[in-house]
Structure formats: C-alpha cells, structure tokens
Image: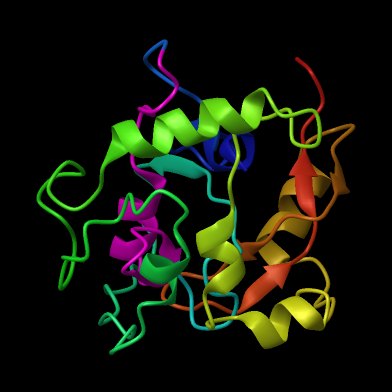
Amino acid sequence: MADYIRLRGARALAIPASQRVRDDGYDGAISHKAVARSAGLGWIGESLLLITPAYGPRVRLGTVLTDLPLVAGAPQTKRCGACQACLAACPVKALLGIGPPDYPESRAAVFDLGACARRLKFFLNQPAVGQMVCGVWVQVCPWGKKAARRGHGSELGKSSMMADAAKELPGAGFEGPCYYFAAGTTMPLTRLRLVAPDR
C-alpha cells in the first residue's frame, strides 16, 4: 500500500505490526492502537486493546504514515459500559481496573507491565505454548464474537484502491487473511493483503 501511495506522488512509510524499537519487545515505533482509534476504527477498551464494533479486539494493526489527502474518521466513544470480562479473566490481574474513559495518559497508570511480562515469559517456557503470547483478553471480549464465529465475515472482494495498486505495481499480488478498512468505518474492504514485489 505504501508503494501505491508513493506512485500517487505522496510520501508513505509503512510501519509493520510487530516492529519494535527496544530490546525488551514491549515498545513499538508507533502506537497502532492510537492511530486506529484516531481514524475512527474503534475505541480503547478496558483491556487497553483497540475494540472495533464488528470484530472486537480480534484485529491486527499496521500503519502507513502518509501526506496523501485522505478523508479522516473520528474517534469512537468507548462502549465497554459495565463489562469487565477482561479484568476478571486476566490471569495475573495486570489490568489495574481503572480503565481510561478515552485514552490512557500512560500505560503504567492503568496496566502492570511487569506482571504481564513475567507471565508471558512463563508461557514462552511452556512446551504447549512456546511463545510470549496470552490472548485471554481477546478471547473473553464480547465485542465481535459473532463475526469471529462466522469466520471474520464474508469476502467482500478487493477494494478499488488495492485493485488499482495491484495493476500499477508489476508483479504485485494478494494474499490473506488481512483486513483493510475505509476511513471512518470498520467495514472490511477485503480479506486480502497487497504484496508488492521485492525491488
């Protein structure tokens, strides 16, 4: 997508979901959640995850920074209400129970990173897991569970922007699953990801 934007004469910098800037693995180059929230894709839930109306926290985010003029969305109002399923399910009680009304001032104010990190390292050493992953908050969040049971919604075909990008990037193709969203909406445009050829 960044290549396509550059072909349109704008600047673009793709920041992958898993890019980290520190060796401890907990800080990224940018908060994809903050960007997605600002674009109107969802809200920051009690779990501190981005929650989308259609898929809940069951999304993977990447960011493309650009100066291309785009229609921007607006942040959504938090809709967790009285639900605290993520707090109750957290095995180490890392969520401090003072979830932000909108967006936290700092991670430390609402989340015990040390407790979570210790548990993730424990999971890494378990043969059945073998990775620093948990996923409990994603599993218990009621938002988006119906879409998850349907297999993440129906295939909607390639968005026109992505289809145009594929035509203009020789050797480009699509692979999935990955979702792209129109500005200001949580309706997935496609389950496919544009894959540009190596240059």
Residue 17: where, in percent of width, then height? 54, 38
Residue 192: where, in percent of width, then height? 80, 57
Q: Nearer the viewer, residue 14 or 19?
A: 19
Whether residue 173 is visible to the viewer of this picture, yes or no, is yes
Q: Is residue 101 left or right of residue 171?
A: left
Q: Residue at x 35, y 78 (%)?
A: 84
| 177 in relation to 65, above or below | below
Which quarter of the rendered picture does the C terminus lie within? top right
Residue 167: where, in percent of width, then height? 82, 47
Q: Is residue 148 left or right of residue 102?
A: right
Q: Nearer the viewer, residue 115 or 185?
A: 115
Image mark count: 0
Whether residue 153 is visible to the viewer of this picture, yes or no, is no
Q: Is residue 94 magenta?
A: no
Magenta stretch, main secondary structure, is loop
Residue 7: where, in percent of width, then height? 59, 36
Task: Kindly give the residue lying farthest to the top in the view shown.
Answer: 23
Q: Residue at x 48, y 37 (%)?
A: 9
Which quarter of the rendered picture does the N terminus lie within? top right
| 198 in relation to 60, above or below | above
In the rendered view, how is the structure colored? Answer: rainbow
Among the 4 quarters of the image, the one containing residue 40: bottom left
Q: Residue at x 87, y 47 (%)?
A: 175
Q: Residue at x 15, y 73 (%)?
A: 101
Among the 4 quarters of the image, the one containing residue 74: bottom left
Q: Is residue 135 left or right of residue 42?
A: right
| 193 in relation to 148, above or below | above
Q: Nearer the viewer, residue 191 or 141?
A: 141
Q: Is residue 38 magenta?
A: yes
Q: What's drawn in magenta, residue-wise?
A: 24-50
